[in-house]
Image (tube, rainbow, N blue to C red):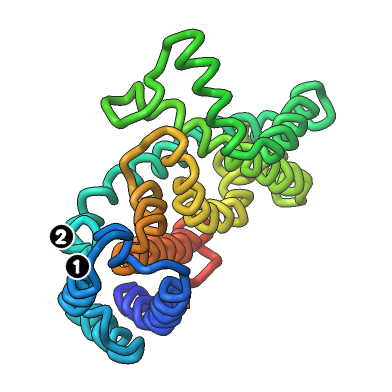
Amino acid sequence: MSKVVLRRLLEAIPTLFAVATLVFALVHLIPGDPVEMMLGEGAQPADVEALRARLGLDRSLVAQYGSFLAGLVRLDLGQSLHFDEPVARLLARHYPATAELACAAMVAALALSLPLGVVAAYRKGTWIDRGARFFSLAGVSMPNFWLGPLAILAFSIHLDLFPVSGRSGWRSLVLPAATLGLALAALLTRMIRTALAEELGKPYLVTARAKGLGPARVLVRHALRNALVPVVTVVGLQFGALLTGAILTETIFGWPGLGRLLIQAIRLRDYPVVQGCVLVISVTYVLVNLLTDLLYAWIDPRIRVT
């Protein structure tokens, strides 16, 4: 297993290199001069040139790209142009908030979708099934930029149940996690319902019932475990979507994570911070997909990770 993990990590290196190159190219194509934004429009030309030389922005793009790659090899993401501190320190300070929000959204989505999808599949064709399908359709149809402000108006301003913004305890986590996880819960509910309903009609379950196994054991021990294989695939892929979706959600709720930092860095033309944020999100996405592959063998022993 350790050899498989090492091989998958080595296979991810070209992907991360391509992402780093693309991000570097796109970030430097953004209009605007970060030095002029830092000093203001009334700055003297000499001061502008001095700061540009100190930050290394007076060199060619090829030279800056070479320095960028050399820093990545040393795990050095450079110095922030605006915050004037190492990018790695900035990311280390903001990453826990994003990870907390993404994990809370995933837990909320699974806690809602798993029982709802199982009951809908087991009671296929009933009002519960129809209600679950309606929830799936409604959930994927509501974008975060609409649901987030609506949740703030309803639960923060009118009912005064949760904070409007910030990160100060579990109560401040409820609304952003629910906003971020609702669409995923709707998608997973539909997938679990479809996969489990298909699994319940297979002959091996009829044999299991004929051998005297109870309905609960047949459902949970056999049918649900096999039905979760495609669901795990979607969960792994959607965790990366949670990280990218957190960019908008963190901005709406003032959550101090990578998403909000990325928006600030783009607005301030802080190239190293933008590159660092995207690279960290990409690495997290690759690692989550690696863990997803390894989970296949645990859920279904017939699958061998190669």
With 248 as the anchor, is 4 left or right in this view? left
- In x, y percent, where is residue 134? 76, 30
Q: Residue at x 46, y 36 (%)?
A: 252
Q: Which residue lies furthest to the top in this view?
A: 159
Asked which quadrant contains residue 35, the reply is bottom left
Asked which quadrant contains residue 114, the reply is top right
Q: Which residue is drawn at 33% across and 68% down?
A: 271
User: As rendered, which of 196 and 181 lies closer to the eye?
Assistant: 181
Image disc number at residue 132: none
Mark 2 and mark 1: Cα distance apart in space: 6 Å
With 178 as the anchor, is 10 left or right in this view? left
Evaluate if marks 2 and 1 touch, with contact meaning CB atoms under 8 Å apart.
yes
Q: Residue at x 44, y 79 (%)?
A: 25
Q: What element carries label 1?
A: loop
User: As rendered, which of 50 and 183 lies closer to the eye?
Assistant: 50
Tell me: residue 219, above or below residue 8.
Answer: above
Asked which quadrant contains residue 87, the reply is bottom left
**Other-residue count near label 2 (Cα within 10 Å), few / some / many at <14 / 14–19 / ≥20:** few
Q: Answer whether residue 99 is visible to the viewer in this image.
A: no
Q: Answer whether residue 133 is visible to the viewer in this image.
A: yes
With 222 as the anchor, is 46 left or right in this view? left
Q: Is mark 2 on a helix, strand or loop?
A: loop
Residue that numbered label 1 is attached to? 79
The number of callouts visible is 2
Tell me: residue 290, above or below residue 212.
Answer: below
Q: What's under tag 2, amino acid-wise?
A: Glu
Q: Which residue is drawn at 54% across and 28% down?
A: 149
**Other-residue count near label 1 (Cα within 10 Å), few / some / many at <14 / 14–19 / ≥20:** some
Residue that numbered label 2 is attached to? 85
With 258 as the anchor, is 30 left or right in this view? right
- In x, y percent, where is residue 3? 32, 79
